[in-house]
């Protein structure tokens, strides 16, 4: 007899762009892509064609937009936690939410040597990323939130002033030690 060992489902590629209007007339922007994956007591949707346990992917997307309107989206670690907590606390049959966010970087333009209040340029392809895993941990509505953050696509170059020496050498090592080299 076949059985379902583990399942999660969700919505990927939720594009989110939020403009925050400050009291001084300036604006700041945040662009991100969100992925939500839910897990819990959802076996019936796979084994008995019972979709009553499914939180529709459209609901996940619209919830993400509403939560972005009601809450800060930066830092992305906080926003990922807010999304995950929402699904785990709202739906008793959902016991875990994986929320991944990739944030693109925008920088305020300089016009006549001054920062423009509402014009931006998209920086290079580097991104800020977070993976949040929110789970219920039993009685009392306690939650566990695990976060992992990193930079993606970041390119760094230092043309001089780096050293590489003291590394392990063996019969296959050809690289000479140096006190001044580039770092890229």
Image (tube, rainbow, N blue to C red):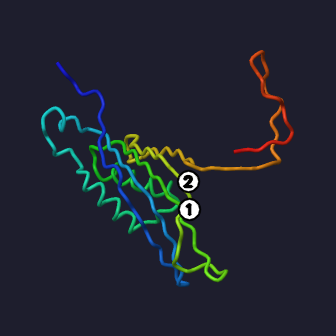
Query: Between marks 2 and 1, how big is the CA–CA gap?
Result: 8 Å
SS label for mark 2:
strand
> Mark on residue 182?
none
Residue toward you, 27 or 3: 27
Residue 26 lies, in percent from the top left, at: 54, 80
State the image quarter where residue 178 is shown.
top right
Residue 145 lies, in percent from the top left, at: 47, 46
* In the image: residue 69, left or right of residue 150: left
Residue for point 28% across, 50% down = 91
- Tags 2 and 1 touching, CB below 8 Å: yes
> Mark on residue 123?
1
According to the image, label 2 marks what residue?
126
Residue for point 53% across, 72% down = 120
On the rendered image, what quadrant is the N terminus found in? Answer: top left
SS label for mark 1:
strand
Residue lying farthest to the top in this orientation = 171
State the image quarter where residue 4 is shown.
top left
* In the image: residue 41, left or right of residue 68: left
Residue toward you, 19 or 47: 19
Residue lying farthest to the left in this orientation = 49
Residue 140 lies, in percent from the top left, at: 38, 46
Residue lying farthest to the right in this orientation = 179
Residue toward you, 49 or 137: 49
Residue 77 lies, in percent from the top left, at: 50, 54
Q: Callout 1: few (<14), some (14-19), or many (20+) C-alpha neighbours within 10 Å?
A: few
The answer to whether residue 141 is above or below residue 2 is: below
* In the image: residue 4, left or right of residue 135: left
Residue toward you, 23 or 180: 180
Label total for image: 2
On the rendered image, what quadrant is the C terminus found in? Answer: top right
């Amino acid at each position: 007899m076949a059985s379902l060992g583990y399942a999660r489902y969700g919505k990927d590629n939720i594009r989110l762009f939020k403009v925050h209007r400050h009291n001084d007339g300036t604006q700041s922007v945040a662009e991100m892509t969100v992925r939500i994956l839910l897990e819990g007591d959802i076996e019936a949707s796979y084994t008995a064609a019972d979709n009553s346990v499914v939180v529709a992917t459209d609901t996940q997307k619209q919830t993400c937009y509403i939560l972005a309107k009601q809450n800060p989206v930066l830092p992305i670690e906080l926003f990922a936690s807010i999304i995950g907590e929402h699904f785990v606390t709202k739906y008793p049959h959902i016991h875990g939410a994986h929320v991944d966010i990739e944030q693109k970087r925008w920088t305020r333009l300089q016009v006549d040597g001054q920062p423009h209040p509402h014009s931006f340029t998209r920086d290079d392809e580097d991104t800020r990323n977070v993976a949040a895993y929110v789970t219920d941990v039993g009685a009392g509505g306690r939650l566990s939130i695990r976060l992992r953050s990193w930079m993606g696509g970041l390119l760094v170059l230092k043309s001089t002033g780096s050293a590489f020496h003291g590394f392990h050498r063996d019969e296959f090592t050809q690289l000479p030690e140096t006190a001044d080299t580039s770092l890229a």
